[in-house]
Image: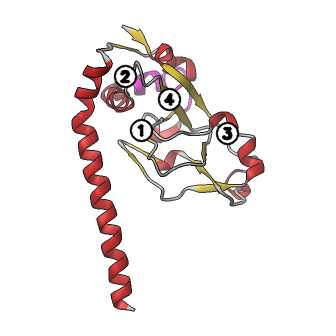
Amino acid sequence: MTFLGDLCFKIGSGATPKGGKDSYRGGGYALIRSQNVQDWEFTKSGLAYINDEQASKLDAVQVESGDVLLNITGDSVTRACIVPADIRKARVNQHVCIVRPDGERLDNVYLLMFLESIKRRLLQIASSGATRNALTKASIEALDLRLPTIEEQRRIAAPIRNISAQIDNLTQINGHLYSSELVLAA
């Protein structure tokens, strides 16, 4: 068994600018909130945007393509997904945790599969001792997992990668078809 904290470069959550949603000033940085983190899927619907000044205060929680995101509070606790490649300039708020695995030792899709497979255990951890469901950084770091070789992890994760690529391709085709419909209707 190996602890998740020993396999990651980063495990941490962010903050919401003072004033909550009323303080989102727009700008070039996406602020990822729990509603953007669905099971297995990242959704851009409802992304908030913050300006350079707000983003600089959250530099420690800048996301990178391929990071695993885990909701750590509230009703959506334990939902997890991977940051898509097209999300470049983004931060997370306090309800979302970045889990950035050391790619030489832990495959990000394998990690996502692991987190999804232990939801019941995560929910038990989140509901212990608090009035609100929450996972702490320490509880995430202390998760233990059996760790096959990185090659075996990638082999296990390959079907999920293939399905995700097919979904992305179909979504892109659907977007093009919708755009074509709008042009033809005009």
Q: Which residue is mark 2?
A: 121
Q: Which residue is mark 3?
A: 15
Q: Position of residue 97 (x, y in %)?
A: 54, 33
Q: Residue at x 65, y 57 (%)?
A: 28
Residue range in magenta is 122-136
Question: Which residue carries the number 4 mark?
Answer: 99
Residue contact between numbered discs 2 and 1, judged by CB atoms under 8 Å? no
From the viewer's perspective, is 104 left or right of 51? left
Q: Nearer the viewer, mark 4 or mark 3?
A: 4
Tell me the kind of residue under disc 1.
Arg
Q: Secondary structure at mark 1?
A: loop
Which residue is identified by label 1?
Answer: 79
Element type at mark 3:
loop
- Foreground disc of the pair 2, 4: 4
Query: Residue 129 vs residue 55: left or right?
Result: left
Which SS type dominates the magenta stretch? loop
Provide residue 89's location: percent of width, then percent of height: 60, 49
Badge 3 amino acid: Ala
Question: Going from the N terminus, do you reach mark 2 or mark 1 first?
Answer: 1
Does 69 lie within the magenta span?
Answer: no
